[in-house]
Amino acid sequence: IQWEKQVRNSAQIHRSGGMSVLVTGAAGFVGTHVSLALKKRGDGVVGLDNFNNYYDPSLKRARKSLLNSHGVLVVEGDLNDGKLLAKLFDMVAFTHVMHLAAQAGVRYAMENPNSYVHSNIAGLVSLLEVCKSANPQPAVVWASSSSVYGLNDKVPFSEADRTDQPASLYAATKKAGEEITHTYNHIYGLSITGLRFFTVYGPWGRPDMAYFSFTRNILQGKPITIYRGKNRADLARDFTYIDDIVKGCLGSLDTSGKSTGTGGKKKGNAPYRIFNLGNTSPVKVPVLVNILERHLKVKAKRNIVDMPGNGDVPFTHANISHAQREFGYKPTTDLQTGLKKFVRWYLSYYGYNNRKGLQ
Ligand code: NAD
């Protein structure tokens, strides 16, 4: 009973015309920021996360405490627990689902391929099954990935470009997600928006990502491994700052329209949309390292090796004109500025407080 009250409180809307949103993966990097932004503008938010140990669970717990202190409840549970999901939908008439829970990372698939199937395929279907039967049906916005462009080397990537050559199991499950969500849109009238994020970074970020582990190693005086591609070419990524991604998530939620079914039956045409959310300004990985060195005031020990062919692609670059047209998406933070904010957070979170003179 106490728990149900907490769920309802967290879902309470505090602005006229506001939405109530189930955010999956709420204790994750992007989920934390999106949940806070929704709550701050007066929307109701209930989080769901299974707190798995793919990376440091204590960081997820710390994000959860941050969310709790802003009035967002994060329910501990798995996407595949259909009963729990149904119970949440019984308690709250969610207008939207922001689906961010997933097994992320491209290299980990070589160690634990099943975790990708569990979360990104089975978990997605479990969530969509509950959404399709809910009354009202929520509009679903979910995180796909720039990795769906795979071996496509025609940059910048536009949404209509080919996505039939994934380079990792992660990418393959995200591509499958785009097709699975399409069938739920087609058969059951669920409003679906897929967001292809491009390498998101920032405070409260993911320890498995390069900018984060580089920072850790540089500060600890350990070497960092930098991959290079064919013909010794540097890898490049369209690094996108978290605040820009949050704006894109809110913009797509606000324009996601309505689902057109009830109780599992479709009534009319609901939107099915896909958007790139990137920065349109790729940066070579060695340049990212230079920026980190400047902010940290420590030289990195570089260990440069050929890319081992474990799922990484040589470069990414988003064309964002579709999102720009539909909801005015316009990234405003360059890598230099964004990394400064990340480093400031990192030093304070990990207790490097007495370091003087951070630029
Ligand atoms: P994250 O790993 O920090 O967040 C995902 C969260 O989902 C985690 O807290 C995890 O515990 C939770 N989760 C995983 N499987 C679950 C399950 N079966 N049930 C319940 N909870 C589960 O990752 P992130 O960087 O915040 O990414 C958010 C989304 O964006 C993911 O779908 C990811 O694939 C996608 N994405 C991220 C990036 C990026 O650069 N960060 C780029 C492209 C796409």
Image: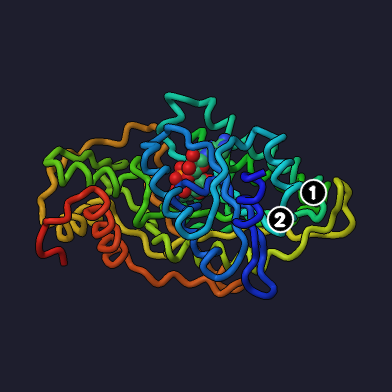
Mark 1: secondary structure: loop
Looking at this view, is 5 or 14 the one in front? 5
Mark 2: secondary structure: loop
222 left or right, relative to 335 = left
The spot of residue 259 in percent (x, y) is 78, 58
Q: Quadrant of residue 13?
A: bottom right
100 left or right, relative to 260 = left
Residue picked out by circle 2 = 94
Quadrant holding the C terminus: bottom left
Residue picked out by circle 1 = 134
In this rendering, the answer to whether 289 lies above or below 307 is: below
Residue at image position (43%, 26%) is: 110
Label 2 lies in ligand 1 vicinity (Cβ under 8 Å): no
350 left or right, relative to 57 = left
Mark 2 or 1, nearer chain start: 2
Asked if disc 2 and disc 1 are in contact, CB closer than 8 Å, the reply is yes
Residue at image position (55%, 62%) is: 249
CA separation, marks 2 and 1?
9 Å
Q: Quadrant of residue 308?
A: top left
Residue found farthest to the front: 2
The spot of residue 320 in percent (x, y) is 52, 66
> Type of residue at label 2?
Phe
207 left or right, relative to 296 = right
Q: Mark 2: give few (<14), some (14-19) or many (20+) Cα within 10 Å.
A: many
The spot of residue 289 in percent (x, y) is 21, 52
Using the rendered image of the protein, determine whether residue 50 is visible from the camera's viewpoint: yes
Residue 289, numbered circle = none
Residue at image position (22%, 38%) is: 225
Residue at image position (43%, 58%) is: 317
> Type of residue at label 1?
Ala
